[in-house]
Amino acid sequence: MKPESREQILDGCVCFTDWSLEMTCPPLRGMAPFLVFWLAVCLGGTGAVDRGNFKTCDQSAFCKRQRALKPGESPYRALLETMELTNTRLTLQLINDNNKVRLLLELYRLQGNITRVKINELKPLKPRYEVPDVLVREPPTEPMSLLSQDDNGVVLSLGVESQRVIVSARPFRLDIMEGRDVLMSLNSRGLLVFEHLRMRKDTQAEPEAENKEEADPAAQAETTKEEEKVEEGMWEETFKSHADSKPNGPSAISLDFSLPGVEHVYGIPEHADTLRLKTTENGDPYRLYNLDVFQYELYNPMALYGAVPVMLAHNSQRTTGIFWLNAAETWVDISSNTAGKTVFGKMLDYVQGSSETPQTDVRWISESGIIDVFIMLGPTPKDVFSQYASLTGTQSFPPLAALGYHQCRWNYNDQEDVRSVDAGFDEHDIPYDFIWLDIEHTDGKRYFTWDPHKFATPKEMLQGLQEKKRKMVAIVDPHIKVDTNYKIHNEIRTRDFYIKNKDGADYEGWCWPGSAGYPDFTRADMRAWWASMFAYDQYEGSMENLYTWNDMNEPSVFNGPEVTMHKDAVHGAWEHRDVHNLYGFYVQMATAEGLIQRSGGVERPFVLTRAFFAGSQRYGAVWTGDNAAEWDHLKVSIPMCLSLGLVGISFCGADVGGFFKSPSTELLVRWYQTGAYQPFFRAHAHLDTPRREPWLFGPENTALIREAVRQRYTFLPYWYQQFYHTFLTGEPVMRPLWVEYPQDPATFAVDDEFLIGQDLLVHPVTEEGARGVTAYLPGKDEVWFDIHTFQKHNGAQSLYIPVTMSSIPVFQRGGSIIPRKLRVRRSSTCMEHDPYTLYVALNTQGELYIDDGHTFNYERKEFIHRRLSYANNVLSSVNLAPDAQFTAKSWIERVVIVGASKPSKVVLKTAARHELGGRLERETRVRTEMGEGKERTTEWEEMDLGRNHHKALMKHYNTQHEDKVADPTQFSSSHSQTHGYLSVDLSHFSDVSLS
């Protein structure tokens, strides 16, 4: 969000103190000009978040109420006589002995080593919300079998080795075991709470007739006893001047999970905090509630823009996961019996033979809905990623250009400004793929429109970018200006698509346009209509190289409670409190579908969202929101993106340079160097900051930024390959070290460095004035090569690395092959047909994936996917997709063997086993670039397989064989024959022998 209008509204500047919908201020039609006046009056500095605008647990009635309940014996017991076991499901009633309300427990064993636990009211007064659309399908089940049963409980087999679940009756408790080990316990601390829906004593309203008839009279008679104690906030809650009516009364749910042997838990983004989650006993729990937080604070559990209720637990033996499928406001408490112990204290426990097993306890508390939890039992990190992906899907496979560099600002002023910035990149030889337009490009904050004066001919602007093979992103926010002269507003109102307030009228709040309505994206028909608005004949001025940014979709309501929508707003049959964290998920879903539909289903979309939920990975990218130009914000971007990757959202980045404030040149350069190695690479800046295009900080800094961006572009083949891999598997692109080295405790809390895939390790420089960094190189049997110097380092060590302003410490894992493109051009599309260089590090293997880079044709098997292996001095290639067909105009130009001794010759074999060879007359440790005559001493050997070299060597070859050989401009999975040159065509290429 752009704070000066929003934040100072919250501070009460001019007349906007504690705005409510009933406030008395200028008339609606005069509001937008008034905001402009207000901006002029109120601009002045941007401080940190005003915590008073956002709730603590004590200010959230249900959190305070549930947290007041301390561990002890649970009032719930299992009624074993009600148990029913089918081939796929166990059902069992639970009863609260304090109020006699009955619950229904459902237990499922799912494919892939997942256990699902659902708890709902047996006979609710009205249906309780169950989250739709997040799961990619109804999860397939596997059979469970009864192992034993007595008066104390039942034991069920989970079918995986010796895994079983024990259901204890009094008090109710679930234990999941493997052999003699307890993997996880539910309700072991007695913190299960399920507040049932009820009628208020002072109302005469009757339950719906259908439910009334179904209700059990005996149970109803018993439940009259339970109107124990009416606590503050149960039926109505006030925060600042905002009232929240609760017609169904208290409806919170809570459940505790115990994790024996676990000291490290991760996930539950979004929080500006360390990768390893902290204990919360001495402060607030971690909060999951999508909010527009102005210049957020670091290293605390406050809610931010997105919420993914997924936690991973890890120790050196096992990784497990908990997916709490609930879209309401949620708080997560974490405690540990080893929290606060020093290393010395832990050693003392060991020496003294302390028998206390480390344990982490987690408690989830949600305001409404049901308990629907998926327990992912691993046992490896990659198993958990696969299990979660089977539930919510994998990261969408982005167009290749989206992995390039993005240039953004609030706002580029007009078409001439766009043209000038675009030309500046060419003048300074810095590649980029996307330029972005923020809210000022529209006609008066009316989305799907263009300012008629500043952007009078948008197609001409887009065509100019397209001619350079570049693209644009324009913002489309979900708050719609209330204006009868605005087509989008009129259609939404006519179709009755707006969210309603508690009284049934269209909900209106204040955002950038002034008075705004909020479309109900929870409705499939609304989403379909929204998608249709991206058609070229609807979105005037749009072209195929225009993509979309969804901001403010928490949703942000400047005059709402906590800068968001009132919880008693209505989405059909549901209150906003039930669906809040889904709103941004649905906005991005509808937008992505619109971009797909406009191309007839051919082109992949690119959509950036600020708000997100579980499953958002299926629809595009996210960023870490409105950060600041401060060193700590640079540092925290790493654990923030690592946390998102662990829960499926790999396409993550942070605003390079910081959105608020102005970075020093050192900070800006270091941020470019860091961002170049994070998945989403975009610079963005606030309206009130000085311009900061990369060439505005002097020639020396321009050169440093240029080099960082160009490094990004050389690695695009590897980035693209990693995104294809995460699309297939759900494994994060940017990942913590412990994911690849799960038995090394030294990696468990590392969050100042990371891996890209499994083969690149990055330790950005994030300290001001740094002259060196200490990187941990994992793997007892690994070796790592500096990608710049090719110096070799052994794994399992902390390595001090001296740095200068040009340094970006990056290492390639020994045993890997990384494809790169070394001819950097003005955009990724310009590099499409350029040749590849393979960087081969010792005896190893890697992959090469190629498709057209922008369509869904890969789903029709139109791609090349090869496994590359280097062993015993032979580089070989195997087709991983024999049924795939694709032709590209690229070739392998060069192979760089890192860490190898000098060979005497190189032999290239085609699939037909014909050989092409030549002697290498170079001295050891000397590299010669063919055709360039440049030599320098290095620690490695390069074999140049360039086209000129091929041509020279093939003259003799074709006098011996009459076969025609593939054109070096062709890089194909099918034979292509012409002139008598040899390209390293992956459909022919069998191996390169080095001897």
Image: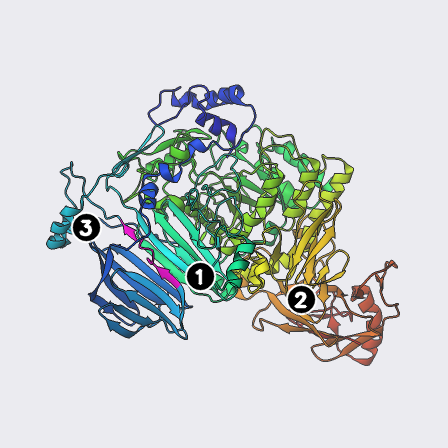
Q: Position of residue 645 (x, y in %)?
A: 53, 54
Disc 2, SS: loop
Say above or below: 200 vs 141: above
Tell me the amino acid under the disc marked 2: Glu
Say above or below: 551 vs 710: above
Residue at position x 50%, y 19% in the image: 37
Q: Which residue is mark 1?
A: 356
Q: Which residue is mark 2?
A: 782
Discs 3/1, front: 1
Q: Is residue 856 visible?
A: no
- Disc 2 packing (10 Å; few <14; some 14–19; many ≥20): some
Which segment did they paint magenta? 184-194
Q: Is 283 placed left or right of 497 in the picture?
A: right
Q: Position of residue 692 (x, y in %)?
A: 66, 35
Which of the 4 quarters of the picture holds residue 229? top left
Which of the 4 quarters of the picture holds residue 520? top left
Tell me the amino acid under the disc marked 3: Asn
Q: Is 139 placed left or right of 789 in the picture?
A: left
Q: Is 206 placed left or right of 817 in the picture?
A: left
Q: Is 464 placed left or right of 699 in the picture?
A: left
Contact (CB < 8 A) between labels 1 and 2?
no
Discs 1/2, front: 1
Residue at position x 47%, y 44% in the image: 534
Q: Which residue is mark 3?
A: 99
Q: Is residue 74 visible?
A: yes
Disc 1, SS: loop
Discs 3/2, front: 3
Q: Position of residue 861 (x, y in %)?
A: 55, 66
Q: CA distance from mark 1 to mark 2?
A: 34 Å
Question: Which of pointers 3 and 1 lies earlier in the amino acid sequence?
Answer: 3
Disc 3, SS: loop
The quadrant of the image that shows the C terminus is: bottom right
